Image (tube, rainbow, N blue to C red):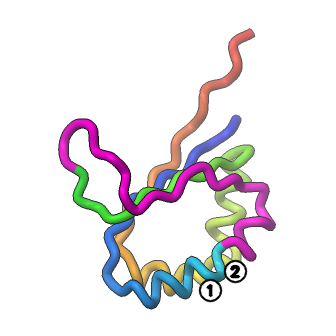
Amino acid sequence: MTVYAIAQLTMTDRAAYDRYQARFFDVFRKFNGRLLAADERPRVLEGTWPHDKLVMMSFPDEAAFLAFSNSPDYDEISRDRKAGAKATVLLVKGFAPAG
């Protein structure tokens, strides 16, 4: 079942985050993920949203996401992400097709 990773980021060190971002796709491509959205100016329609960026990704299943997020390559680059931004990351299950 498809899963969606949603990251809400508040920048703390833009240079560190930019280093992470520059290397992200080299790692991401290896794990069958799809980048669905990355927006530094999402339009808030209701409530408050205190973050600077939203990122949405999809993976074929939870195992693929975990393989990505626990990989040594991602661990290496994620140090810059963690230094560059505070994050809330959600993993959301997609709907199974009706049938």
Mark number displayed over residue 76: 1
Q: Secondary structure at mark 2?
A: helix
The reply, left or right, for residue 23 in relation to residue 85 is right
Which segment did they paint magenta?
25-48
Q: Residue 36: say if magenta.
A: yes
Crowd rating for badge 1 (residues with CA inside 10 Å; few <14, some 14–19, many 20+) = few
Q: Position of residue 66 (x, y in %)?
A: 65, 59
Name the kind of residue labelled 1 in the image: Glu
Q: Secondary structure at mark 1?
A: helix
Name the kind of residue labelled 2 in the image: Pro
Q: Residue at x 45, y 58 (%)?
A: 39
Q: In this picture, is 21 found above or below 39?
A: below
The reply, left or right, for residue 21 in relation to residue 17 is right
Residue 54, by quadrant, is bottom left
Q: Which residue is mark 2?
A: 72
Instruction: Depth check: give the residue in front, 78 or 72.
Output: 78
The reply, left or right, for residue 40 in relation to residue 10 is right
Q: Position of residue 76 (x, y in %)?
A: 62, 86
Residue 23, by quadrant, is bottom right
Instruction: Depth check: give the residue in front, 16 or 41.
Output: 41
Is there CB contact under 8 Å for labels 1 and 2?
Answer: yes
Q: Quadrant of the C terminus?
A: top right
Q: In this picture, is 54 found above or below 29?
A: above
Residue 51, by quadrant, is bottom left
Q: How many marks?
A: 2
Q: Residue at x 37, y 51 (%)?
A: 42
Q: Residue 42: say if magenta.
A: yes
Q: Residue at x 24, y 52 (%)?
A: 49
Q: Residue at x 36, y 86 (%)?
A: 13
